[in-house]
Image (cartoon, rainbow, N blue to C red):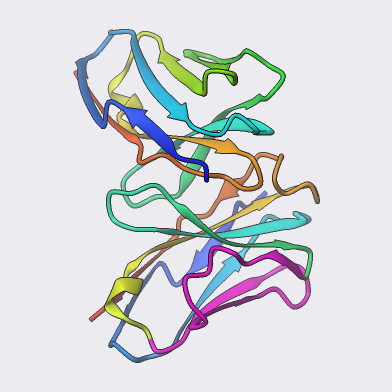
Amino acid sequence: GAGVSQSPRYKVAKRGQDVALRCDPISGHVSLFWYQQALGQGPEFLTYFQNEAQLDKSGLPSDRFFAERPEGSVSTLKIQRTQQEDSAVYLCASSLGGRGYTDTQYFGPGTRLTVL
Amino acid sequence: KQEVTQIPAALSVPEGENLVLNCSFTDSAIYNLQWFRQDPGKGLTSLLLIQSSQREQTSGRLNASLDKSSGRSTLYIAASQPGDSATYLCAPQGGKLIFGQGTELSVKP
């Protein structure tokens, strides 16, 4: 079956624009995660969903970042009024069970966001 | 707060060598530890997951060990191949995955 997919793969935004990044997890996966990866760094946790419930959003860097998963499948990460420091690769991952913090996570290819 | 350190940051070896990548972490209260591979411009591929109660896991030419009490894990790659060239990331999982900065491996033919 298909893996985790993300779109767009690349996004260039002018400072101050709003962007929306999409994640399609593996079908049937209960848990979904978003990570931010700056150049040369490891990924950093942003937020976690179990089905449609956002159980942990402690990693979101500011209130400009918002994530949703309204039907428990596809998720969207929205960044309002983008800043240059938001430039990074945004990774989405999903895992099968509801024990999100203990199962193997499967990652998508990421969306590379560049803010000019 | 969990902090993860990976040594070395970069490694270049000739094809066929056995090698060891090191990972240390500060908080031993973890459920498991995962090793991932990341190719340039790509997402992460899970290589091995070691449960906190386990000491090691093996998959093909890869062997990962975990010493939770000392906060250390190693990834051993046997008979390295050019196709092994990638960045390797370790991530202990307590409440969430916390990643190290990775080891960039280059295997020369």
Residue A29 coordinates in the image, percent (x, y):
75, 54
Question: Can I make out residue A46 in this image?
Answer: yes
Query: How many numbered marks does the figure carry?
Result: 0
Percent x, y of residue B5: 38, 33
Identify the residue shown where x is 45% and y is 19%.
Answer: B75
Q: Residue at x 66, y 39 (%)?
A: A104
| Image position, residue B103 (x, y; %) | 32, 32
Q: Is residue B39 above or below residue A72?
A: above
Q: Quadrant of the C terminus of chain A?
A: bottom left
Q: Nearer the viewer, residue A68 or A107?
A: A68
Q: Is residue A39 left or right of residue B53?
A: left
In the rendered view, would you say A50 is above or below A17?
above
Q: Position of residue B21 (x, y in %)?
A: 37, 20
Question: Splitting the image into 4 quarters, where does residue B100 fall?
Answer: top left
Q: Give above or below for B6 relative to A30.
A: above
Q: Residue at x 26, y 32 (%)?
A: B9
Q: Is A12 contained in the magenta span?
A: no
What residue is drawn where x is 39% and y is 50%?
A: B42
Residue A27 visible in this rendered orientation of the protein:
no
Q: Nearer the viewer, residue A2 or B77?
A: B77
The answer to whether residue B28 is left or right of residue A99 is left
Tell me the quarter of the picture where residue B101 sits.
top left
Q: Is residue A67 magenta?
A: yes
Q: Is residue B21 above or below residue A82?
A: above
Q: Is A83 positioned to the left or the right of B31 in the image? A: left
In the rendered structure, which segment of residues is drawn in magenta?
A53-81
Residue B12 in which image quadrant: top left
Asked whether A42 or A104 is in front, the reply is A42
